[in-house]
Image (cartoon, rainbow, N blue to C red):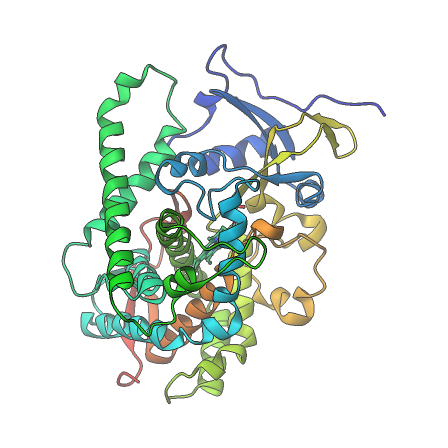
Amino acid sequence: TETVPIPEPPGLPLIGHITSIDQTYPLGSFMDLAEKHGDIYRLRLPGRTVVVCSNHALVDELCNEKRFKKVPAGALKEIRDGVHDGLFTAYLEEPNWGIAHRVLMPAFGPISIRGMFDEMHDIATQLTMKWARYGSSNPILATDDFTRLTLDTLALCAMGFRFNSFYTQDLHPFIDAMGDFLTESGAKTQRPPLPAWFYRNQEEKFRSDIATLRKTAEEVLEERKSGESARKDLLAAMLKGVDPKSGVSMTDQSIIDNLITFLIAGHETTSGLLSFTFYELLKNPTVYRKAQEEVDRVVGKGPIKVEHMSKLPYISAILRETLRLDSPIPMISVQAIEDTLLGGKYPVHTGEPCVMMIKKSHTDPLVYGEDSLEYKPERMMDENFEKLPKNAWKPFGNGVRGCIGRPFAWQEAVLVMVMLLQNFNFVLDDPNYSLRHKQTLTIKPNGFYMRAILRDGLT
Ligand code: HEM
C-alpha cells in the first residue's frame, strides 16, 4: 500500500506545537486545528506526539481493542500521582485494574444502582429546596450547584459520607483540594519543560492537596473498618469483594485510590451533563415543553419513584443528545498496540498516543446528516439510537475501559431532571447568553446562569 505521512501543522523547534494550544481552552485549539488540517493530524508536544482523529471512520478504528488500548495521557497521567493505578488512570496491564474492575462491576450493576435511589433522592431534594428558597429573582450559577449535587451524591452513595455542600458556606477541604489537584494536573501538561525548581511552589501545593485527598479517604476507610456498618455501598463492595479470577481482595491502598477516583471521575462529568442539558432546554423551547409534558404525564405531581426512571424515553433522548454535542469528556486517548495504518494509509507506530476527538466525530455529517450541529433529541429516541453505526456515540468511552459509572450517572441525571422539571419553570438569566465553554479535567458551560420559578408548591 501507498502510505501518506500524517499532516502536521507548522511548529517551532524544541517546543513543537505547544504554542498552538490555548492554555485555558485546549479543546478549542484541537477543534480549530482539525478545521485547518483535517480529520487527522499530528502534534508535537514536550516529550510526546499525539495523533488527533476527528471523524467517525477514524474513531471507529481507534475503538478496535485488538489494535488500540487506552493510555492515561495528558492530565490523566498526572492524576496518577494522586490515585496511581485506580480504575480511571491505570494502564490495562496493571493487576490492580483487573482486580478492581472485576470486584466493582457488580457494584455498579442495575440492582445495586437501584438500591442507591433513596440516597440520590435525598441529595436531589436538597438542591430543589435550596432553589425554591432562593426565589425566582436570583440568578443561579447552574454548574456550581450541580457540582455540589454530584459530589454530595457520590460521597454519600460510594462511602456514606456527607459533604453537606448545600449547608455550608465553604466547601469541604477535600473538595477544594480535589479542584486544585485537578487544575494543577491539567496545567502541568501545558507548561514549557523548564527545570523542576521553576515550578517548586506549584509542586508543593500539588503534594499537599494529594495528602488532603488521601487523608480524608483513609479516615473514611478506617472508620468503616472499625465499626459495624450495614451499608451496602461501593466501599462495602470493595472491602468485602473477592476477585473471582485471582482470588484476592483489594488492598487498602487500592480502595483509597478508587474512592478518590469515583469522586474525580463522577462529579464534573455528571454536573457538566446536567448543566449543558438545561442550557439546551432553555435554547430549545419546543424540546423543553415536550420534556415537561413527559414528566407531567409519567410522574405527575406525586413522589418520584425508582420505577419511573425507565419510563421517560424523551428525557433519555435529551441526555443522549446533550452528550453527543457536548461530551464532558471530549477527547479519549489510546495507543497503537503494534505499528499500523489509520485510514488504510497513515502510519502510526507502536505506542504512539492517538486521540479520539469525539466532540468532532459526534457531529460527523456522514453519520448525523447535514443538521448534525443542531440539537434534536428526536434522533436519539430508542428506535433511532439503536440504528446508529457502531461507535458513532462514545461519550462514555470504549470497551473494557468504558465508564463503569454510567448507570450511576444515568439514574442520577434522570432523577434530577424529573425533580427539577416537576417543581420549577426555568428561564435564562440573560436571554442573550450563548454557550461558552470552560475546561478543567472536563468541559462545562462557562457563566451559565438561570432562574428557577416554582410551578406550584414543592412536591
Ligand atoms: C471512565 C465518561 C460518570 C467513573 C469514563 C470514560 C469516559 C467517562 C469517557 C473513559 C475515559 C477514558 O477512556 O480515558 C463519563 C461521563 C459521565 C461519567 C460522560 C457522566 C455523565 C461517571 C460516574 C462515575 C464514573 C458517576 C463513578 C461513580 C468512571 C471510572 C472510569 C470511567 C471509574 C474508568 C473505568 C475503567 O477504565 O475501568 N467515564 N463518566 N464515571 N468513569 Fe465515567
Q: Is residue 55 left or right of residue 110?
A: right
Q: Point out residue 150 in the picture as x, y percentages from the top left corner.
A: 34, 61
Q: Is residue 145 left or right of residue 74?
A: left
Q: Is residue 329 above or below residue 153?
A: above
- Residue lying at the far left in this picture: please name it: 169
Q: Point out residue 441 in the picture as x, y percentages from the top left corner.
A: 40, 43
Q: Point out residue 102 in the picture as x, y percentages from the top left corner.
A: 54, 57
The quadrant holding residue 51 is top right
Q: How many marks?
A: 0
Q: Is residue 442 above or below residue 20?
A: below
Q: Residue at x 23, y 44 (%)?
A: 212
Q: Is residue 161 above or below residue 65?
A: below
Q: In terms of depth relative to the viewer, which is nearer, 279 or 21?
A: 21
Q: Residue at x 73, y 27 (%)?
A: 346
Residue 369 visible here: no
Q: Quadrant of the C terminus?
A: bottom left
Q: Quadrant of the N terminus?
A: top right
Q: Point out residue 296 in the picture as x, y percentages from the top left corner.
A: 44, 85
Residue 227 visible here: yes
Q: In terms of depth relative to the viewer, which is nearer, 47 or 328?
A: 47
Q: Residue at x 67, y 34 (%)?
A: 337
The quadrant holding residue 34 is top right
Q: In terms of depth relative to the viewer, which is nearer, 422 or 369?
A: 422
- Residue lying at the far top in this picture: please name it: 13
- Residue lying at the far front in this picture: please name it: 247
